[in-house]
Image (spheres, rainbow, N blue to C red):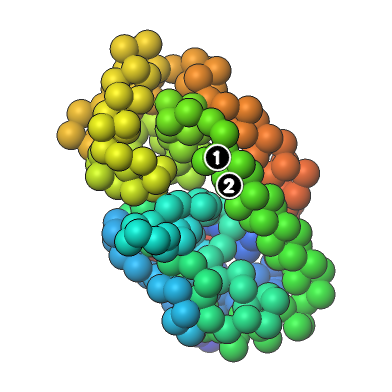
Amino acid sequence: MARMASAKRLDRLPPTNRLLDALPREPCLRLLEACTPVELTRGQSLYEPGTPLRFVYFPTSSYVCWMIPVDPPGVLEVGLVGNEGMVGLPLLLGVDRSPLRARVQGAGHAWRLGADAFLQACSSNVAWCALLRRYLQACIWQLAQTAGCTRFHVVEQRLARWLLMTQDRAHQGQFHVTHESLASLLGVRRVGVTKAATALQQRGLIRYHRGDVTVLDRVGLMSASCGCYRIDCERADLLRPATRTGKVRRLAPGS
C-alpha cells in the first residue's frame, strides 16, 4: 500500500532533475523511494576536499558550485551544477573521496541518495549509467573550458558568463550573490568584480544592488560574455538527456 501511495503521489508532481527524468518510469520510482528530499541552504558545504562521498545529490531548484583551494589561501570556482546534473560524480570512477569543495550557491531543494544505493542503481541500469558517464564528460569539458576562460579572458567577460550560467540553473532572472562571493568564485579582487559589475550595469544588461542580481538583457549579456558560454551550451546540448514521454510527473522535494 505504501508503494502504491508513493507512486500516486509522484504521479501528480512535475519534473525535477533531468538525469532522474531520463530514467524509465519504474526504475525512477524505485530510485526516488531510496532518495531523501533535502533543502539546501546557500553557503552550505556538501563536500570538502578529501572527505568521503557518503551521498550524491540531484539538485532540483538548488544549484551547487565546485571549488578548488589555491595557494595562497583562497578558492576558485571551476564548475556549476543545477537540475541538469548531479553532485558526487567521482563515485562513477570508483573514487570515494571528493577532490573538490562542493558548496551550495543557490538555495533550494534536491534529492539525496546514499553512495551505496547510487552505485547499486548504476549497476542495475546500464543505460542510465552510460548517460551519467556522458554527463561526466560534459562536466570535464566545463572544467577545462573554465580553466581556459580564467587564463585568457577579462573579468567582465567571465562575470557575464558566470551570470548566464547561474541564471540557467536558477531558472529565473533574479538571484543573490555578494561581491565577496563573486571575487572568490572568479579568483579576482573585489574591486575587479565591482568594476566589471558596474560596467555591465551601465550598459543596461543587469541591475545589481546589495547582492541581488537581475538580468535585464539576456541577449546583451550573451554578447558581453566570452565565447566560452556558447561553447558550454553547445557541448551540453550534445549530451543533454532526453526526458521520458508519458513520464512520472514529480514535484521538487519539499514543495
Image vertical order of residue 49 relative to residue 140, above or below: below
The reply to whether dot 2 and dot 1 touch (C-beta < 8 Å) is yes
Q: Residue at x 43, y 66 (%)?
A: 101
> Can residue 85 be seen in this snapshot?
yes
Q: Is residue 29 left or right of residue 176?
A: right
Alpha-carbon distance for marks 2 and 1?
6 Å
Residue drawn at point x = 68 percent, y = 82 percent? 94
Residue 12: % across, % down: 51, 58
Taking the image as shown, residue 201 lies to the left or right of residue 35, namely left
Q: Is residue 223 above or below residue 189?
A: above
What residue do we see at 59% from left, 88% from top? Answer: 116
Q: State the residue position of label 2.
A: 147
Q: Can you tell which mark lies on residue 151?
A: 1
- Percent x, y for residue 22? 70, 59
Q: Residue drawn at (64%, 49%), measured in percent from left and top? A: 144
- Which of the pair 220/244 is nearer the observer? 220
Figure check: 203 above or below 147: above
Residue 240 in the image: x percent, y percent?
A: 71, 48
Q: Residues within 10 Å of mark 2 (few under 14, many from 20)?
A: some
Q: Amino acid at mark 1?
A: Arg
Q: Is label 1 in a helix, a strand or a loop?
A: helix
Q: Is residue 29 visible?
A: no
Quarter of the picture containing the C terminus is bottom left
